[in-house]
Image (spheres, coloured by chain):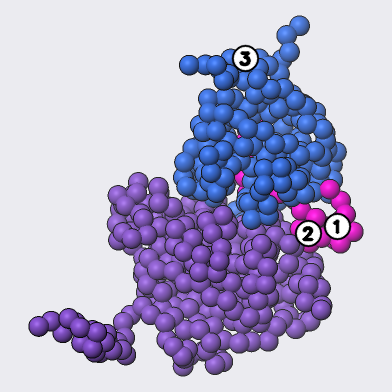
Amino acid sequence: MPDPHLAGLPGAILHDEVVPARAPWLHRVHKGETLRVVDLEGNQAVDFLMYSAADDAERYSAQDTVAAQGNIFLRTGAVLLSNEGRAMMRIAGTNVDYHDTIGGACSCESNTLRYGHFTKSQHACVENFLTANARAARGKRDMVSNINFFMNVPVEADGALGIVDGISAPGLTVDLLAEMDVDVVVSNCPQVNNPCNGFNPTPVRMIVAGPGPDAA
Amino acid sequence: MSQTADPYGAQAHARAMGGTRVAAMPTVPAAAADAPGPAIWEETIAPGGYASRRIGRGARLRLVDLEGDACTSLLLFNAEQPAERLNVADTLKVQWNGYLGAGKVLLSDMGRAMASILVDGAGTHDAFCGPSNQASNERRYGEGANHTACPNARDRLMLGVAKHGLSSKDVHPSITLFKGVKIGPDGTILPEVGPFSPGREVVLRAEMDLIVVLANCPHVLDPRPDWAVTALRATVWRGEIAPPDDPVRNATPEALRAFLNTEDYFSR
């Protein structure tokens, strides 16, 4: 039986990896390649940043992205822009209604505000981002607002905003077509104090497909 | 012979300009008759201008939209260790609300209170869209570089951080004061860009020593075809740090823990 997670991916499978629960991930995706993120067990937030491989001072900008599309939610067709207003990736397809890019990443420090100082030693996404970025000589100054795939942050009429129960499900995916060469940095979110992971962090699968390095 | 043909003439020519007043300029030494305390910074920032300044813990920063069409992009850094900076996502998420106003705290990425909004006479602010950039200005106005007539906010912020030894990597996600957005039920961003009545003001209190970076350029979603923005006045005076019974400090359990973290940082 064919692997349903590979259905519809264009070209050859260039990379296929399961990122364990709570783990960081760093991978270069080249222009023209598609990165598919698979929410294996459902409602697992995947915190996501990216940097231009040519110059990592150019990086994902949540603010430029939502301003340009006039909407805070990331849906199929969304163009993920850099801080210079250039397309870095495009959501080529997703079977989740929308993804978040307002809520940012959890950190040990912000957890102390949100839940209390007893959470200070828990795992957090910023720790993962710093760990993965350190491999590419990036540091704290390179932290900016991120995407949270498979995470649900509605905004009410009075501005009330929060991470609520997810709208993803086991096996749902998001396909990201690279518009430039990018370093993708992921934290498979370890948060256990809110519903972003259904209070239970689980693995996700990262599949890169495309024409490959020999394509003309 | 030209007046500026030799150094003596050029010197006289230059010195004759001293004392000139224009609409947008700093007042040095600082003076502001309408400030509640002795002013330590007084500057009118031009349309399209920027400023960056170090201010001390407890200082009050008053921003006035003098003519009703100012648009203030704001960055904040911990002046002692600028790797600590405003975190817009945490500011919204931790306070469970997307709209900035009086009583809200601006939070750092280290879980600390950086600044409090003491007074908000505007009510139209934006924590979602961030600054314009060269590309967005070129699309709308045909140009957007710093040296053109239509500078963009992001590149103004870059110059502002550069004056403190920082670089483009440090232009973090910003907030925008005086121009606002609301979020519709389907996530649509609804700009509220005025122009508004003149004289609206916002007063912030620094909760730690800060590098404040301000740019005054049109909002990135301003629909008007012409680059339109008016002057911004900034005034700073010294003030007391938040007392234990401060209403902003005690407004929410999350704000209180942010203040406790800041106070813990200053336990030295």
**Residue ID for mark 1:** A120
Magenta span covers which residues? A95-123
Q: Residue at x 60, y 67 (%)?
A: B76
Point out which mark residue B263 bears. Answer: none
CB atoms of marks 2 and 3 within 8 Å: no
Q: Secondary structure at mark 1?
A: loop
**Residue ID for mark 3:** A12
**Residue ID for mark 2:** A109
- Going by the picture, which residue comes out furthest to the left? B1
Question: In the rendered view, does B256 fall on the left or right side of A70?
Answer: right
CB atoms of marks 1 and 2 within 8 Å: yes
Q: Amino acid at mark 2?
A: Glu
Can you give x and y, in whole percent of width and height, for residue B251 in the image? 73, 71
Question: In the rendered view, does A188 fall on the left or right side of B7?
Answer: right
For the residues marked 2 and 3, what is the alpha-carbon distance in whole angstroms? 42 Å
Q: Chain coloured purple: which letter?
A: B
Q: Amino acid at mark 3?
A: Ala
CB atoms of marks 3 and 1 within 8 Å: no
Q: Chain coloured blue: which letter?
A: A
For the residues marked 1 and 2, what is the alpha-carbon distance in whole angstroms? 7 Å
Q: Disc 2 or disc 3, which is closer to the eye?
A: 3
Q: Amino acid at mark 1?
A: Lys
Q: Secondary structure at mark 2?
A: helix
Counting other residues with Cα less than 10 Å from the Cα at mark 3, is it few (<14), some (14-19), or many (20 or more)?
A: few
Q: Earlier in the sequence, mark 3 or mark 1?
A: 3
Query: Mark 1, chain letter?
Result: A
